[in-house]
Amino acid sequence: MGAFRWWDYGRAVLAVFKKEWLMQLRYPAELVGAVIWPVLFPAVYIFSARALAGPDGEAVAVFASRTGTADYVGYILFGTMLWMILNITLWDLGGHLRREQVRGTLEACWTTPASRVGMLMGASLTQVSTSVAFLLVAALVLRVVYGFELRGSIGPLLLLMVLSILPVIGLGLAFASLVVVLKEINSLVFLVRGIFMVFAGMTYPVEVLPGWMQAVSRFLPLTYSIRAMRAVGLSGAGWAEVRGDALALMAFSVVLLVAGWLAFRGVERMAQQAGTLAHY
Amino acid sequence: MIGAISRSVLRRGWRAALRRERRRATGGMDMDALVTAEDLRKRFPRKRVGQRRWWPWARRENGRGGNGTGASGAAGDEWIVAVDGVSFEVQRGEIFGLLGPNGAGKSTTIRMLSTLLEPSAGTAVICGHDVRWEPMQARARLGVVLAGDRSLYWKLSGRENLEFFATLYHVPAHEVPHRVNWALERMGLADRADELVERYSTGMKQRLSLARALLADPPVLLLDEPTLGLDPQSARNLRELILELKREGRAILLTTHYMEEADFLCDRVAIIDHGTIIAMDSPGALKRRLPHERVYRLELRETNGALRLTDLVPGAAVVEERRDEATGTLHLALTLAEPEQDLAALWTGLAHSGASVVNYSVQEPTLEDVFISLTGRALRD
């Protein structure tokens, strides 16, 4: 008893994962919303694009010349799906500690010998599983509703997906910690997701942005995720063509996961010193 | 000046190191003391509306700063001293109570012992493990019940809650079902185990919290206001359970502001006020310290409104005086230096003064009287 044991760490991660899923299942309306939203959200952009393309799709050629693909539906779907994963992560993982704090259960969990980082990792695992489930459902529904077809191979896409989720989790961990300090999540989520929506090229290539905005977009991991996954999924690009973006995502993963861990440790220590865990 | 501070810091550091070494040498604990608090202190920065900082990490707990309320620290910070040099030990098989009014520092002390708060100074040791340096080891030996019923997941059943926490308490996977059933049976919740906690009464939630605290079979229990908000029957049942746990040899530290509870449950009580322990002994010994054992309570309706009891009975001391505007009566609590003579003088004096006695009772001393005699205030003030 006392020494750090990976087995106990892993069990704490899985316990939180199971608990989070059980609680999600107790709110079935939210699950229904999670299935419907991926269909509704891209529709706004897809139908706007259809209107802008002209009655016979005259503008699609112009679009293809800028993006390398005429499949504007797929183009929009990749952008919106990845943005929605970011959005879910900010709400769910980013609000995890805050929800526990407001609920009154954070202190109860933190009086156990389980690793506090492990518990947050459990919430991250829930987040990953939610994202995967979200993607699977979305892919199925989008195929039926929008006739979306994947052209690239699954292997690189899966790898890119993992590399895309890791920095988002790092961001979520930092966000979770920040929200405990600021005690307010809404405005922060709206701000961050708004920045990603505009700068990361969710429905358009970042090349259409003014120069300073393009410079900002280079500091957002979502920019690289969207670009690489579009290249593989829509144009059938190989690993060599997206290697640069993949490396950038790896770097973002390391930086943001470390930043998230440090932010959590900082907040943990601050809460222990200032006694703010019970304040909400 | 700086040299003196450095020497003080060094001396404290060495003392702490020596204490840790001594505990290691004695197999992790000092005899039967499972909980030790030594000169424990906690202060918080005072927050005022409109003074919120957006860089909270800039304010260091152990940075420059004063020692008392209103003292200035780094960059003009002001501090509230919540716990000021508290020391005590809790032995195996003992219930030790921290008794005091709201805001006295009881919960802050429990939060430091349970590693939720970092002490500003002093040491706290659970079964030989310093809460600051070995927090996980300390937590592994603790069962904690915090005040209020919000520490459970209301959207999970009682069983699901306990299964979750059993894992966090590192109960081996194959033992979890057995341990959860045992805890549920013990707290009388087995027949409601699979219902959502949101359907539980406050008393059931509190019992479930205690069941959670027992999952790891800890040698030490920290109970923060365990009967707060419970109806009398539930509170009585919970007190019986706490006594059972004590008989099993656990060290139990509980906070309460119910003096009857402290009197009934505790082997020893520390009366805490403004963050400082002002008396510590068994309830009986504390009451025996009172200069007068009995308190005489009178409810009087005066005729002339200017009754001076101490003029009537020189040996009387008024410990409480309250006027009830609704009934127009005066409530007095007195102690008498020479009860037999003073009582006779009291009745004669009252008859002559024209005041009529509406109610009269004699009360054996309570811990509340101890608190009043020590602070001049009632616990509820």
Image: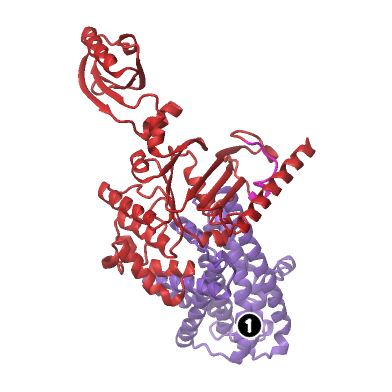
Question: Observer-nearest residue: B106 or A110?
Answer: B106
Residue B238 image point, x, y percent: 32, 53
Kindly identify the residue that appears in the image at 48 percent across and 87 percent down.
A143
- As drawn, the residue found furthest toward the top would be B352
- In the rendered structure, which segment of residues is drawn in magenta? B55-67
- The chain letter corresponding to red is B
- Identity, as a three-letter code, of the amino acid under mark 1: Leu
Residue B166 image point, x, y percent: 44, 68
User: Does the magenta stretch mainly form a helix, a strand or a loop?
Assistant: loop
Q: Is residue B158 above or below residue A64?
A: above
Q: Tag 1, which secondary structure?
A: helix
Residue A221 image point, x, y percent: 66, 73
Is residue B63 rendered magenta in the image? yes
Task: Give the number of marks.
Answer: 1
Kindly identify the residue that appears in the image at 28 percent across and 14 percent down.
B341
- The chain letter corresponding to purple is A
Q: Is residue B171 above or below residue A240?
A: above
Q: Split into 4 quadrants, where in the image is the N terminus of chain A?
A: bottom right
Looking at the image, can residue A84 be seen?
no
Give the image's coloring scheme. by chain
